[in-house]
Amino acid sequence: MDSSPDLIERAQAGDEAAFRELVDAHRNELHLHCYRMLGSFHDAEDALQEALIAAWRGLSTFEGRSSIRTWLYRVATSRCLNMLRSGRARAREEGLMQPPELPRPTRLGEVLWIEPYPDALIDRVADRAPGPEALYQTTEAVSLAFITALQLLPPRQRAIHILRDVLGFHSTEVAQMVDATEESVNSALKRARATLRQRGPDSASQHAPPPQSPEERALVERFTRAFQAADIEALVELLTEDVWISMPPIPFEWQGHARARDVFGAVLQPGQQLVATRANGQPAFGFYQPDSRAPILHGVGLLVLTLAGDRISAMSRFESGLLSRFGLPRTLPRRPA
């Protein structure tokens, strides 16, 4: 439901409380939109704040020719495009060197700045169905593989693809949002779709068990037991033959069972612990390792799994600084032996 004319008029007259009420109804979906555009939770927060400031300053120019929601998406998209064109939305410089204990990678990663997104925040916008033009369900359009693939598109194509195929805006609305003709929007959309068909998520990921289903829970339980026991062979049995392992922002990726064994051998140790959460519609875990000098475990990262049937087709480990965004502690008490 869009905002009442009275609320808009009061906000345009300088009523800050009315403006907050106006934008709060759309804040969560705008944040998710910025995340899709930028691939980074941190950058999405910055872009959203800039967008809200710009909306406050520019609200007097809103003439009601579109809904306030559409206008806010236009403002947020503009801020994201500015960030992308200026180079601000990029990988952090720290962490780009390969830790010496990790094995030789299969290839270099292309999207080093990717970050996971908490399901708790996705759930806040899941009740808003995409528009009639959308080609994706909400769960499809938040997976790590999809968010990563989006980052391979040029900024303008990315914006158009998200606005049209993910959010379901009409091409005439998108043309107004990105200050382009409808013809150029349709042309850019064709190119974006072609790129994603070539470089998008593997079709196997579409056959993942439903979230929170008995099949998913069983696989997660097997993974948790094997990981906490540092049982490398049990872990490898749970992986697809072509599994990919990544550790953003470390610029390397490893594929296949042999490389997975090497990675597990480098990072696993007795006494580690996983705490379940969810990210990007996928099973995720806080990853904790014991302190040799104190009876605690330190958070060393966040793991996100991509499932394909009854196997794991991808594992992504992110830095420990993200744990707080998922409501996870930085340390845990060590369990008695």
Image (tube, rainbow, N blue to C red):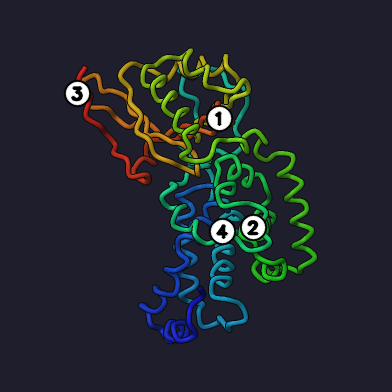
Q: Quadrant of the C terminus?
A: top left
- Residue holding disc 1: 314
- Write down the residue under mark 4: 80
The answer to whether one can see residue 271 in this image is yes
N-terminal of the two: label 4 or label 2? 4
**For the point 21% across and 29% down, which residue is it?**
333
Q: Secondary structure at mark 1?
A: strand
Residue 96 in sight from this viewpoint? no
Pick whichever of labels 3 and 2 is earlier in the sequence. 2
Which numbered disc covers residue 294? Answer: 3
N-terminal of the pair, mark 3 or mark 4, is 4
Give the x, y percent position of residue 245: 54, 27
The reply to whether dot 3 and dot 2 touch (C-beta < 8 Å) is no
Q: Secondary structure at mark 4?
A: helix
Judging by the rendered image, the residue that carries numbered circle 2 is 159
- Tag 2's secondary structure? helix
Q: CA distance from mark 3 to mark 1?
A: 33 Å
Indicate the amino acid at tag 3. Answer: Ala
